[in-house]
Amino acid sequence: METTSTKRIDTNLLLQTASTTGSKRPLVILFSWLLAKDRHIAKYRNLYTSQGFDVLSIRVSPTEVLQPKKAQDVIKKTLGILQEAEQKLKPLVIHGFSVGGYVCGEMMVELEKNAEKYFDVRQRLLGQIFDSPVDYEGVPTGFANVLSNNKMIQKLLKVSIESYLKLFKNSVTKYYMASSEAFHNNSLELPSLMLYSRADPIGVDKNIETVMKKWKAKGLPVQTRCWQNTPHVSHFHHHPDEYVESILTFMDSIGLGSVHTPNKDIFEEEKEKFTSKMRN
């Protein structure tokens, strides 16, 4: 089995690559959910590295999300890494979770704003995966639920964040709106996979399906997997087999089938090994 190496770039960015990585080995840009623990994100990194992908994990703090210019700085740093010599030829795929979808939207805004500068990144982006994505209207609820388990405190936080967004409409909220618009427009016309749940009060199914309808209306390929009862960003934990199958089927559809397992029997064997590990 191929070994991997992990490089902590800074508090926001972590790069996991194969020790014998090639210049065209695909790279997944993983936008974590708020306050995600490393052991949780590691499960997703391991899924991808086991299938021959490198992974760049991006994590932002609540403070950085509430101050969009700080999130934008993280995005600029991320795009700079994607243009470094070791990464500049790699096919790219986005995988965003929850409010991480907002940070991903900031990247899309930057790619549009500086299309010439990031032409190579735009050309290498082949697809996007979203797990329980939260659009602009879900930010107050998402923040409140992440920061506290106490219902009373959640209500206070939600009201406070809503007031904050109203008060700083011109200096803060406009960036959330621009990110949301970029998410809805999918101007790069990327094939997409949506993973979500009917029971999720944060990544609301109807809002997600509204976005998907817009993409489908543009003739863009959209794959979906919707569960009935799984909690927010917990689909992999509760349904590892279906989750892995959805990811790998999508990767195959955009021409990025497993680097190490082109044979279908081996492919299924590797998937079973991974999902068995997840259950234990």
Image (cartoon, rainbow, N blue to C red):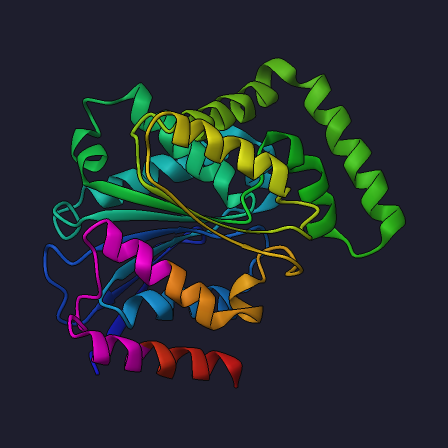
Q: Quadrant of residue 80?
A: top left
Give whichever of 213, 161 is nearer the camera: 213
98 left or right, relative to 272: right
Above or below: residue 38 compared with residue 163:
below
> Residue 207: within the magenta?
no
25 left or right, relative to 48: left
Percent coordinates x, y for residue 237 in the rendering: 55, 70
Quarter of the picture holding the N terminus = bottom left
Percent coordinates x, y for residue 201 in the rendering: 71, 46
Percent coordinates x, y for residue 22 in the rendering: 10, 61
User: What's the residue at 24%, 47% (across, down)?
Assistant: 92
Give whichever of 205, 127 is nearer the camera: 205
User: What's the residue at 23%, 33% (across, down)?
Assistant: 122
200 left or right, relative to 194: right
Disc count in the image?
0
Percent coordinates x, y for residue 43 in the rendering: 44, 70
> Residue 249: within the magenta?
yes
| Residue 3 seen by the camera | no
Which segment did they paint magenta? 247-270
Above or below: residue 223 compared with residue 21:
above
User: What's the residue at 56%, 18% (across, down)?
Assistant: 174
Q: Residue furthest top?
A: 170
User: What's the residue at 22%, 67% (across, down)?
Assistant: 52
Above or below: residue 45 compared with residue 119:
below
